[in-house]
Amino acid sequence: MKITSARLIICSPDRNFVTLKIETDEGIYGLGDATLNGRELAVASYLSEHVCPCLIGRDPSQIEDIWQYLYRGAYWRRGPVTMTAIAAVDVALWDIKGKALNTPVYNLLGGKSRDGVMVYAHANGRDIDETVDSVRKEMELGYIAVRAQSGIPGMSGTYGVPKGTKAYEPAERGLPSESLWSSERYLRAAPKLFERLRVELGEDVHLLHDVHHRLTPIEAARLGKALEPANLFWMEDPVPAELQEGFKLIREHTTTPIATGEVFNSFWDAHDLIRNQWIDYLRMTIVHGGGLTALKKAADFAAIYHVRTGCHGATDLSPVTMAAALHFGLSIHNFGVQEHMRHSALTDAVFPHEYTFSAGYMYPGDKPGLGVDIDETLAAKYPYERAYLPLARKLDGTLTDW
Ligand code: CS2
Ligand code: MG
């Protein structure tokens, strides 16, 4: 089998997606997600200008060799653009291999380790009352794990809470918007939210919370301690992770489990975090972390240190990544949880897929390959529109992490 073409399908059904389609001389094709929220065309250019020409004529079954060729051969290593591009090729090749061998991708990763993949949904509200109702709604839909994000008293808006009545979508058309942030007000409000959630909804539901990189280590330690009575499943991205050692300080003060890594693009971003057990869950995701080939290696290293996976799964990761994540989550032993921010009906129509949700778990289906496709005719009706993630400033105007 030989690769005969590798081309991009860029579309925007509600939000931007970049999809790589690799076709072969035996009529089998594979899909890879190449979406990097807010920087989509950078990855598209990296693929079309620098990667795709090198794929033509290659044997698509040589997944490991092609991964090494694209990683080492670039000379300039790592970074979100490079690793998202490599991930798109990698996932498309696993899709092709599954189709060629007439088996679902999870079978190529070691087979099923569990019946289904536990997922968590997003709940949010402008205040505690709305957020409690939102978590309750997700539980009524069948989720047994729910992330809760609430507005902060005295602040006009914050991460994770939609501005209008539409479902929360991180990227916004037009130039980046700016919002204000106050760690002091947040640190007063967050523990009250989870105290109320436990009183109203009980102990059984897994509650998660995303700090979204906005605190210092000692502030995160304070929050982790304050959240201990709520028994969170995890406190996510407590601090920016460039200083991996910063997590050591948090760890010394609290037993609230810690998850981080959705912005990681290489195992090396998590090396110290894992080998020192400074985290409990690795959020690095297939589309931004170099693909299934890379994530499998990262997960196997993490397993040695009792670290489990908790892959990122927001709407800015396409259904191709969702499918790949479910095959991955079904198979690896140290699976923790998979994020499931539901795509819109229009996005699901552009990306028909086999995966399903039932009673808190998702299932990738048993179709050969990933079990996801793209309707190119429908996709063409929704062209790319530049969009950005918001920025944040402290009350005194200092730019901070959004
Ligand atoms: C968030 C994301 O899902 C999460 O955990 O951190 O919504 C994140 O803000 C977006 O994926 C950024 O594109
Ligand atoms: Mg997050």
Image (spheres, grey):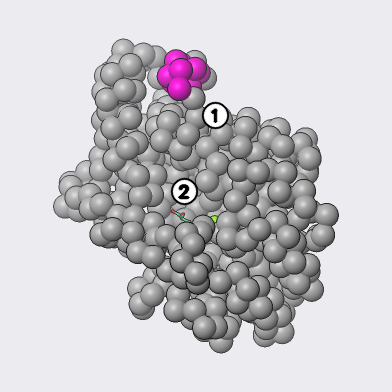
Tell me residue 286's x, y (percent): 51, 40
| Image position, residue 361 (x, y; %) | 58, 58
Which image quarter: residue 13? bottom left
Secondary structure at numbered mark 1: helix
Q: Position of residue 296 (x, y in %)?
A: 61, 33
Query: Going from the N terminus, do you reach mark 1 or mark 2 first?
Result: 1
Taking 379 as reference, is 84 left or right?
A: right
In the figure, 366 relative to 96: above or below? below
Q: Is residue 73 magenta?
A: yes
What residue sits 47% from the left and 59% below the top?
A: 399
Q: Which image quadrant: the N terminus?
A: top left
213 to 300, vertically: above or below: below
Q: Which amino acid does label 1 sit on?
A: Thr
Decide if residue 135 is on the left or right side of residue 21.
Answer: right
Q: In which quarter of the image is ligand 2?
A: bottom right
**Residue behind mark 2:** 322
The residue at the far front in this view is 396
Residue 302 makes an appearance in the image: yes
Marks 1 and 2 close (CB-CB < 8 Å): no
Q: Nearer the viewer, residue 328 or 256?
A: 256
Label 1, label 2: how far apart the Cα atoms are: 16 Å
Magenta stretch in the rendered image = 68-76
Q: Between residues 185 and 355, which one lies in front from this camera angle?
A: 185
Left or right: 26 as drawn, with respect to 297: left
What residue is shown at x 58% (from left), y 56% (from top)? Answer: 213
Residue drawn 82% across and 59% down? 253
Question: Magenta stretch: residue 6 in it?
Answer: no
Q: Is residue 101 visible?
A: no
* Residue 293 numbered mark, or none: 1
Q: What residue type is labelled 2?
A: Met
